[in-house]
Image (spheres, rainbow, N blue to C red):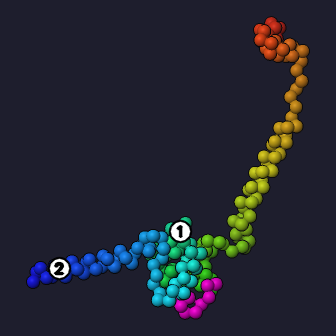
Amino acid sequence: MWVDLSLSRWARCATLAGALLLGGGAQAAGQASLVADDPELEARVLALSHKLRCLVCQNESVAESRAPLAVDMRNQVREQLAAGKSEREVVDFLVARFGDFVVFTPPFRVSTALLWFGPGLLLVLGVSGLALRLRRRAQETPAPLDDAERARARALLAGDPPPEESRK
């Protein structure tokens, strides 16, 4: 009887481990596991989840993250899409709840204008600063050499020791 109990316990553990391994295989590969029976709904959930940022991982989408909050967000997206809401309504709900940070592409507003125009502005400033510096450098002319400096230069180019009066 003891053997039967231990075998059934091992069988339950093996079944549970197999279910976890098979069910978590899609998540381990960086994909959200399929939950809904409707493949069209699941495709919409997955597509929308790729546009949303995981608030825990911050550089992963909700579809790729395995954080518990990301799983909850995917479930929320699935429930709302199943209830008939549009993708825009689901995104608006999540933005209202978590802020603009939840979407990978922030909306254009006055508060986000620096995000949209900042990189271009920095590029224009950098290129114009470089052009201005190069133009000034090209316009600079060296002071002309006097007779002693010219004689010393000729002697150096000829390989002769420079004249005594120009040495310092």
Percent from the top left, x then y, of residue 138?
Answer: 85, 37
Task: State the residue in front, 102 or 1.
Answer: 1
Q: Which quadrant, please, contains the N terminus?
A: bottom left
Query: CB of mark 1 within 8 Å of CB of mark 2?
Result: no
Magenta-span inclusion, residue 86: yes
Dot 1: element: loop
Magenta region, residue range: 78-88
Percent from the top left, x then y, of residue 102?
Answer: 58, 74
Task: Measure the alpha-carbon separation of dots 1 and 2.
Answer: 42 Å
Q: Which quadrant, please, contains the C terminus?
A: top right
Q: Which residue position holds label 1?
A: 60
Chief SS of the magenta region: helix
**Could you say which quadrant of the image residue 156 lies in?**
top right
Magenta-span inclusion, residue 165: no
Figure disc tally: 2
Residue depicted at x 88% and y 20%: 145
Residue depicted at x 48% and y 76%: 32
Taking the image as shown, residue 89 lies to the left or right of residue 162, namely left
Task: State the residue in front, 99 or 129.
Answer: 129
Task: State the residue in front, 47 or 61.
Answer: 47
In the image, residue 161 sits, relative to residue 135, either above or below, namely above
Residue depicted at x 85% and y 16%: 149
Amino acid beneath label 1: Glu
Percent from the top left, x then y, of residue 114?
Answer: 72, 65
**Could you say which quadrant of the image residue 116 lies in?**
bottom right
Taking the image as shown, residue 3 lies to the left or right of residue 121, namely left
Specify which label sits upstream in the sequence, 1 or 2.
2
Determine if residue 96 is in view: no
In the image, residue 126 sits, relative to residue 65, either above or below, namely above
Determine if residue 47 is in view: yes
Q: Which mark is residue 7?
A: 2
